[in-house]
Amino acid sequence: MSEAVKRKEPLFSPRNKKLIFNPLSKENPITVQVLGICSALAVTAKLEPAFVMSISVMAVLAAANVIISMLRNTIPSRIRIIVQLVIVAALVILVDQVLKAFAYDVSKQLSVFVGLIITNCILMGRLEAFAMGNKPWPAFLDGIGNAMGYAWILITIAFFRELFGSGTVWNYPVMENLGLYDLGYKNNGFMILPPMALIVVGIIIWIQRSRDKELVEEK
Amino acid sequence: MFSNRYIFIYASVMVIIVAAVLSSAATYLKPYQERNIRTEKIMDILKSVKIDADKADAETLYNKYIVEELALNTAGDAISIYKNQGFEKGDLRPFDIKLKTELKKKQFLDAGKKADGEPAFPMYICKHDNKTFYIIPLRGKGLWGPIWGNIALEDDFKTVYGVTFGHKGETPGLGAEIATLAFQDQFVGKTVFDDNYKFTSIDVVKGGIATMPADQQIHGVDAISGGTITSHAVASMIRDCLSNYEAYIKKQVK
């Protein structure tokens, strides 16, 4: 592609739109690439931490993608992983400090998992696979897209786990207000435990694949 | 290809920039973080006397209900008294005492080693509903990290009015249950001294207090199934911390 053609490309060209929307479904980091499962299990017992975690990952991923993409021609390939790690680690520490200062309760709930964003495979995967070879704007979109793909799965899991596990949605007592407890309904304590998150992810993957046959591997 | 020289310079410059950014962020955000920690401490203290405070009114409620702060030495004398926003004696604000440091000093002195000054232990006196409560902060070692809490005694200095426990990283579902009301409510009404004011503390009993002699059950609570080490840690935390106040309490009840 020549320089002139590139400059004409609009901000939201079909190619750029794909960067945002593909990770939501066809290239979803959790359900298709099966990355970032660890945090998907750990922080999804309630909606609020899942939401904050998603926002944190989005901030870190988008910023890291842009920074790495801007530096991509100066980074010596021999130390590129170290450079990526340092930048991700710095951003994660920043997010952690900001949460501690302005969202203390949530930061206590997320505890080590904010720090573990560093080891989230989605981040290193996107930096290595996309940001190292693309311009900052597409890299930014790619970061947002992948974080959104991660976020909606997280939030969906958290919604079901909180609803059936604690009977609430965003701490609002839905089940109690519906009067289900009076009818003998009981919260399912199993939903709060991490293994149930895996089962919910499994169900989401199942639904996704039965609707989109392209994702089903040929034998 | 980049030369080795380039790589070294690149790495050094990058690390220096990152360090500068992080340290300035940490410095800038520190006051906000410290305020959060302080508010949490206040909320915990108030919670032990069953006053529910939220972030906004914690400071106001604290000033309203906590009428006096004492710093006590192990002989049971107040070395510092903080009352009505001013010092009545000494110049060490009991609220600012770091219990961890003081317990370490005590431990060093007990072991016959030199410590950095005499340990001072904080106590908060609360007036609420025409009753006086004595709140003693606790700190100890759990299974995976520190555990802490507050214990509020009634004005006979032996009956527990309320407790709170917190932990850094006890096992969820097992040891972490110490932070739940179900566990903490067991302590209410138990006594830390017997009728002759002999220090008994409160034991956290594996197998349940039903295994204790009937007259001892007032000094015990049920341990958490599957959380034995954390349960023991809670018991020894209460024993270790309260024993520092024994001398003071004996003087008060005489």
Image (tube, coloured by chain):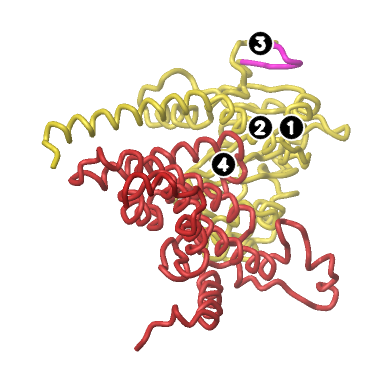
Chain colours: A red, B yellow
First reached walking from the N terminus: tag 2 or tag 4:
2
Give the amino acid type for the residue marked by disc 1 in the picture.
Ala
- Marked residue nearer the N-terminal end (3 or 2): 2
Q: Which residue is mark 1?
A: B58
List the residue tagged with mark 2: B39
The residue carrying mark 3 is: B89
- Cα separation, mark 1 vs mark 3, equals 25 Å
- Dividing the picture into quarters, in which one does residue A44 lie? bottom right
What amino acid is found at the position of numbered circle 3 in the picture?
A: Lys
Q: Position of residue A88 (x, y in %)?
A: 38, 44
| Any part of residue B143 in sight | no
4 or 3: tag closer to the N-terminus? 3
Q: Closest to the observer: A17 or A128?
A: A17
Q: Residue at x 34, y 28 (%)?
A: B17
Calculate the distance from the C-alpha at mark 2 to the C-alpha at mark 1: 7 Å
Q: Which chain does the numbered disc 1 sit on?
A: B
The label number, if any, that marks residue A109 in the structure image: none
B129 horizontally vs A20: left or right: right
* Residue B148 - label: 4
Q: CA distance from mark 2 to mark 4?
A: 16 Å
Residue type pointed to by label 4: Trp
Picture residue at 48% right of the left edge, 63% below the top: A23
Q: Position of residue A85 (x, y in %)?
A: 32, 45
